[in-house]
Image (spheres, rainbow, N blue to C red):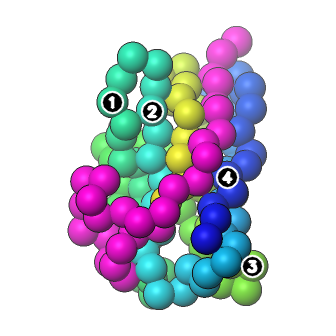
Amino acid sequence: VQLQASGGGLVQPGGSLRLSCAASGFTLDKSAVGWFRQAPGKEREGISCINYSNNNTNYADSVKGRFTISRDAAKNTFYLQMNNLKPDDTAVYYCATARGAWCIGWSGLLWRSWGQGTLVTVSS
């Protein structure tokens, strides 16, 4: 069971990145999936979640309107499209699968598997 996050990098303010999270050893189709981030000196923050059937998404206020989560069942992968990036978005981004099928919260107890993290740096 493994999640592999990728797509991070250095981007200028106002730019875009797309993060990917590929699952291996299990299928994502029955789980909610999500993205978290942790900035230097700050606690981990849940920022986006999509439920198993793709008909409900949640976003933290800090990213609402700029980030979009999606998933591709055929590729067993999910994504985070990040637009209009700001310096405050600089963080290590982690993907995760929930213990259930629905987006019900950000507590670590609700999440089963975690990716290794990918660094996003927003700077001019």
Q: Which residue is mark 2?
A: 38
Q: Nearer the viewer, residue 120 or 82?
A: 120
Callout 3 touching callout 1 (CB < 8 Å): no
Amino acid type at circle 1 is Glu
Taking the magenta stretch, the answer to whether it contains residue 117 is yes
Q: Are marks 4 and 3 in contact (CB under 8 Å)?
A: no
What is the distance, in whole Å, between disc 1 and disc 4 at their CAs?
20 Å
Q: Please, what is the three-letter code of the amino acid marked with disc 2?
A: Gln
Please determine whether, in this image, residue 111 is positioned above or below residue 101. above
Q: Dots 3 and 2: beta carbons under 8 Å?
A: no
Q: Circle 1: is it few (<14), some (14-19), or many (20+) Cα within 10 Å? A: few
Number of other residues with Cα within 10 Å of mark 4, as a class: few under 14, some 14 to 19, many 20 or more = many
Distance from the alpha carbon under mark 4 to that under mark 3: 14 Å
Which image quadrant is residue 28 in?
Answer: bottom right
Tell me, for residue 35, which label it has, or none: none
Point 54% across, 20% down: residue: 87
**Magenta part of the protein: which range?**
97-124
Q: Position of residue 25 (x, y in %)?
A: 67, 78
Mark 3 lies on residue = 75
Residue for badge 4: 5
Of labels 4 and 3, earlier in sequence is 4
Q: Amino acid at mark 3?
A: Lys
Q: Are marks 1 and 2 in contact (CB under 8 Å)?
A: yes
* Whole-number angstrom distance, CA of label 3 to CA of label 1: 31 Å
Of labels 3 and 1, earlier in sequence is 1
Q: Callout 2 environment at 10 Å: few (<14), some (14 to 19), or many (20+)? A: some
Mark 1 lies on residue: 43
